Image: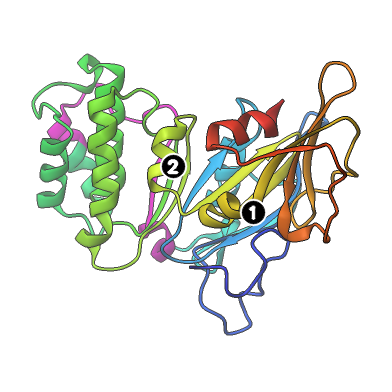
Amino acid sequence: MIQQQFDPQANVVPDPTSGATELAFAARNLSVRYYGITVFDDVSFSVEPGAVVAVLGRNGAGKTTLLNCLLGLTVPDSGEAEVGGVRSDALTDAVRERIGYVSQSPDVFDGMTVTESIELIGQFYAGWSPEYARDLCVRLDLPPDVRAQALSTGARQRLAIVQALAHQPDLLVLDEPVASLDPLARRDFMRILFDHAEQLGRPVTTLLSSHLLEDVERIATHLLFIGQRRMQLYGTHDDITAYVRVVHSTQPLGEVTGPGSAILHATRLSGFRWRSVVDLRYLGANALPGGVVVSTPTLGDLFEAMNT
């Protein structure tokens, strides 16, 4: 759908000044270190309008840091990021107006009621829709007259979602937005995501980190795996389903070189057994040795294989 200008598996980002379609998000050779410890190194990818990108990885893999780099909240040690064609460290008011952000920890005003909180946030956005905000509150079952400090953790998360969407942004950055929600609230949130583009009447691009793989499978057009201090895999959900396989063998299949290569990840299991994640598009004819076991992984299987 959106990978017309670059190989989705390669660490290459199109030049935004080349006259190509404006990218919704882009990262070029991002590296972040804290106190001498590398969080991730040389991460590059780009996202065109309308994609839903699931950012997947274990706790501490760097998902939140990556999203914060895109938003300009974390300054990378090297490389650069862009949102809407503008550098993340110099976002304009026009681009900020287009961003809807939900953090892992809901950012709400404890001393205000739900209605008061929403009205306050609305003053800062030209595109704020009171009607849409009220509709979202109803759909997410938020009590309008209850103070935020009295809300449950899940209700505070739902309030943060309303505050992030009611100004009708088309660039969504959602960091574990449903982690505190019960199954019914998660279902309602997923429906709202589907309906949001219809509300706006234009494409909506979403970056979503989540450990709830069942939800991710329903909505993601693209998958980005991050772990072991690097981007391990990035591509369309359809391509990854069609071409990425898990291979069990009695010997290593080759060197792990990451996205754009045949061997994406390899793990030595007990005894003389190896488990490798391979991309069939980069394997030559008859490249796999005899005696190997090749399986098509579910998203859960792939997550496990990439992270153990």
> What amino acid is labelled 2 in the image?
Glu
- Choose top left, top right, bottom left or bottom right for residue 292: top right
Give whichever of discs 2 and 1 has the lower sequence position. 2
* 159 is within the stretch colored magenta: no
* 102 is within the stretch colored magenta: yes
Q: Which residue is tagged 1?
A: 243
Quick check: marks 2 and 1 in contact, CB under 8 Å?
no
- Choose top left, top right, bottom left or bottom right for residue 60: top right
Estimate the x, y position of residue 127 in percent, counting from the top left. 24, 60
Q: Which residue is tagged 2?
A: 217
Say which residue appears at 85% left-offset and 44% top-offset.
256
- As displayed, is residue 42 above or below residue 47? above
Nearer-the-camera pick, 153 or 249:
249
Nearer-the-camera pick, 145 or 26:
26
Say which residue appears at 22% left-offset and 61% top-offset.
198
Label 1 element class: helix
Estimate the x, y position of residue 272 in percent, counting from the top left. 90, 22
Estimate the x, y position of residue 97 in percent, counting from the top left. 36, 59
Task: Inspect this view and state whether residue 128 appears.
Answer: yes
Nearer-the-camera pick, 144 or 44:
44
Q: Quadrant of the C terminus?
A: top right
What colour scheme has been applied to the protein in the rendered image? Answer: rainbow
Mark 2 and mark 1: Cα distance apart in space: 17 Å
> What amino acid is labelled 1 in the image?
Tyr
Q: Which numbered disc, 2 or 1, marks the residue closer to the eye?
A: 1
Range of residues picked out in magenta: 93-117
Say which residue appears at 66% left-offset and 75% top-offset.
15
Residue density around tag 1, few if under 14, some if 14–19, many if 20 or more, within 10 Å: few
